[in-house]
C-alpha cells in the first residue's frame, strides 16, 4: 500500500491497492454482485461451477460467505476510481493440501473487468495482507486447470504451482502456493 491509498481507506475497508479497495460487504452489495458475477455463466465456470447461480443460491452464498463485520471471510471488491463493484475477493481457510492453517487467496471478477490487471493487483495486496497483517505462514491459490489468466495472476502475485488436486465441491483444481519465508526473502527492501 502506498501512503496515498492508505489515506482514502474507511473503517469498512480491509486492504487497498493502487486502484482497488477490499472492504466488508453490505447487504446492498448483493444486487450488483449478482449482476456482475453470480449470474454470469463464464465467470461462474471459472470460479466455482459450470453454471450461473440462481438468485436463491447466490443469496445464500452471499449471506454465508461474505464478511459483513471484519470476520475474515470473503470481501466485496471496489474500484477506487468510482466505487463500482467489480467482484469479490478475500482470504479463506483452505484445507485442500490437508493443512488446517493454510489460507487461500481468491479473486472473482466480473467479465468486463478481466484483462485489466485487477486480479494480479488484488492478489499481491492479499499476499501482503495475509503475511504482514493476518499472520499466515502459507497462502494458496486454487484454480481451474484451464484458467490461464488466473494462473498468470497467481504467479505474478508470487505463488508457484504446487500440485493438482480433486476437490469435493469444485472438481479438479491446480494449487499454487507461497510460504511466508519465500515471500519475505523475495520482497526484501
Image: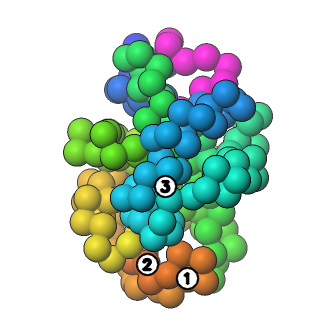
Is residue 14 found inside the magenta-colored segment of the image? yes
SS for dot 3: strand
Which residue position holds label 2? 173
Label 1 to label 2, Cα distance in Å?
7 Å
Quarter occupied by residue 154: bottom left
Mark 1 surroundings: few (<14), some (14-19) or many (≥20) residues within 10 A: few
Is residue 93 found inside the magenta-colored segment of the image? no
Q: Residue at x 55, y 43 (%)?
A: 34
In the image, which residues are magenta? Answer: 7-16
Q: Are marks 1 and 2 in contact (CB under 8 Å)?
A: yes
Which residue position holds label 3? 106
Label 2 to label 3, Cα distance in Å?
13 Å
Q: How is the image coloured?
A: rainbow
Label 1 to label 3, Cα distance in Å?
16 Å
SS for dot 2: strand
x then y, percent, for residue 37: 47, 47
Mark 2 surroundings: few (<14), some (14-19) or many (≥20) residues within 10 A: some
**Of residues 67 and 29, the one drawn nearer to the viewer in this rendering:** 29
Disc nearer the start of the sequence (2/3): 3
Mark 3 surroundings: few (<14), some (14-19) or many (≥20) residues within 10 A: many
Q: Residue at x 45, y 83 (%)?
A: 172
Vertical arrangement, residue 44 with respect to residue 89, above or below: below
SS for dot 1: strand
Quarter occupied by residue 115: top left
Which residue position holds label 1? 167
Disc nearer the start of the sequence (1/2): 1
x then y, percent, for residue 97: 56, 81
**Of residues 162 and 170, the one drawn nearer to the viewer in this rendering:** 170
The C terminus appears in which quarter of the rendering?
Answer: top left
Vertical arrangement, residue 144 with respect to residue 124, above or below: below
Q: Residue at x 70, y 48 (%)?
A: 59
Secondary structure mostly taken by the magenta-highlighted segment of the chain:
loop
Amino acid at each position: 500500500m502506498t501512503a496515498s491509498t492508505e489515506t482514502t481507506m474507511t473503517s469498512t475497508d480491509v486492504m487497498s491497492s493502487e486502484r482497488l479497495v477490499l472492504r466488508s460487504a453490505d447487504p446492498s452489495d448483493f444486487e450488483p454482485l449478482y449482476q456482475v458475477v453470480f449470474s454470469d455463466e463464464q465467470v461462474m465456470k471459472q470460479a466455482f461451477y459450470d453454471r450461473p447461480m440462481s438468485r436463491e443460491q447466490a443469496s445464500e452464498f452471499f449471506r454465508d460467505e461474505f464478511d459483513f463485520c471484519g470476520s475474515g471471510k470473503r470481501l466485496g471488491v471496489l474500484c477506487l476510481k468510482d466505487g463500482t463493484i467489480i467482484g469479490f475477493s478475500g482470504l479463506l481457510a483452505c484445507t485442500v493440501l490437508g493443512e488446517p492453517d493454510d489460507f487461500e487467496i481468491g479473486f472473482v471478477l466480473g467479465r468486463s473487468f478481466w484483462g485489466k490487471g485487477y486480479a494480479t493487483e488484488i492478489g499481491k495486496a492479499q499476499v501482503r495482507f495475509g503475511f504482514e497483517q493476518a499472520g499466515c505462514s502459507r497462502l494458496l491459490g486454487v484454480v481451474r486447470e484451464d484458467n490461464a489468466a488466473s494462473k498468470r495472476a497467481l504467479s505474478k502475485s508470487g505463488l508457484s504451482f504446487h500440485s493438482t488436486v480433486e476437490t469435493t465441491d469444485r472438481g479438479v483444481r491446480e494449487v499454487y502456493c507461497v510460504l511466508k519465508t519465500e515471500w519475505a526473502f523475495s520482497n526484501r527492501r
